Image: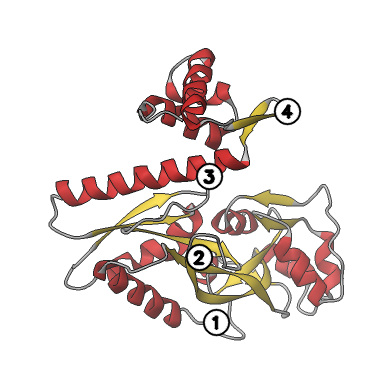
Amino acid sequence: MTHTLPPLEALEAVLSAAHLGSFSAAATALGITHGAVSRRVASAEHWAGFRLFARHGRGVRLTLEGERFAARIELAIAMLQDSQDKNRSHHGLDTVRVSVVQSFARLWLIPRLKSLEGFPLDLRIELEIDNRHMTLSDARIAIRLGQGGWPNAVSEPLFNEVLQPVACRSIAEDIGPTPEAEDLLRYPLIHDASETGWRVWLAGQNLTHVAEGKDRLFSGHDLALLAAASGVGIALLRRPYGSEFSNLLGLVPVHPAVVDNYERFHIATRPGPRHATVERLLKRFRRQGANHVILKGTS
């Protein structure tokens, strides 16, 4: 390993290839040739002293050492961006970057943005729509769905969820008022990012989920609910998370059974002391989460 830092363009090529999974895709995104990406990655590997990527089918993926290297690059860039925000702030407010998936921003955070930023306004939230792993720093937190316990992060649950099947009124009328759980399997099941939710709900009804060609998979809970409202099939409403949007779309429950969702949204922060502004924002997140309770018997 040399003492001279690698050029920023080499680090940029590493991150782009890591996120997109191929040198060709990275070349397109960066507006350079495939060969240029290869040379820049080779430069970074020479500096690091180990291989960053391994071939994977027609693409590439990071080696274990490469994953650590890329994570450190992202953290360093995040810290630089945070510093820039403090130095160039034109609104006079401390800024906290919040990394979220798009559906969470649309269904939960933006409707509560005014309350989270305070009245009178005393902080500013900058949203980063990011489906990848979390890059955390002194002024950057993340909201992620899962069971918590992520490495190099402190996580705390935001609120609990239950799962209940919902559909548009025409499908609900076709199913009838007192259906058996098996009756729902005549329709396409709409999955929210994975098949886990339906697997858990069906197991609660002593049924086994079997993937079928008629089922549909969407990348966000908002998209799954929109698909259900358009008559594509039956979605699992995650209450209370998607309840407001579900009611707005006119979706109705098609079975009374609800089961606990073992995955929850968590607030993830960097280990160690936190800035007072971040602590203030976390308290507001907790208050909003506590208010976002599950109302039994409602959608």
Q: How far is mark 2 from mark 4, CA to CA?
A: 40 Å
Residue 193 drawn above or below residue 173: above
Q: How far is mark 4 from mark 3, CA to CA?
A: 22 Å
Residue linked to disc 1: 294
At label 4, which amino acid type do we have? Gly
Q: Residues within 10 Å of mark 3 (few under 14, many from 20)?
A: few
At label 1, which amino acid type do we have? Ile
> Which quadrant, please, contains the C terminus?
bottom right
Q: Which x, y percent locates residue 290?
A: 44, 82
> Looking at the rendering, which quadrant does residue 122 occupy?
bottom left
Residue linked to disc 3: 68
Q: Which x, y percent locates residue 115?
A: 29, 72
Q: How far is mark 3 from mark 1, CA to CA?
A: 39 Å
At label 2, which amino acid type do we have? Phe
Residue linked to disc 2: 245
> Looking at the rendering, which quadrant does residue 91 occupy?
bottom left
Residue linked to disc 4: 57
Classify mark 3: helix, strand or loop. Answer: helix
Classify mark 2: helix, strand or loop. Answer: helix
Circle 3 or circle 1, nearest the eye = 3
Look at the numbered discs 4 and 3 and tell me whether their residues touch, using CB distance below 8 Å: no
Look at the numbered discs 2 and 4 and tell me whether their residues touch, using CB distance below 8 Å: no
Give the residue displayed 55% in from the left and 25% down from the top. Answer: 25
Circle 2 or circle 4, nearest the eye = 4
Classify mark 1: helix, strand or loop. Answer: loop
Which of the two discs, 4 and 1, labels the residue nearer the N terminus? 4
Residue 15 drawn above or below residue 289: above
Q: How far is mark 1 from mark 2, CA to CA?
A: 15 Å
Circle 2 or circle 3, nearest the eye = 3
Look at the numbered discs 1 and 2 and tell me whether their residues touch, using CB distance below 8 Å: no
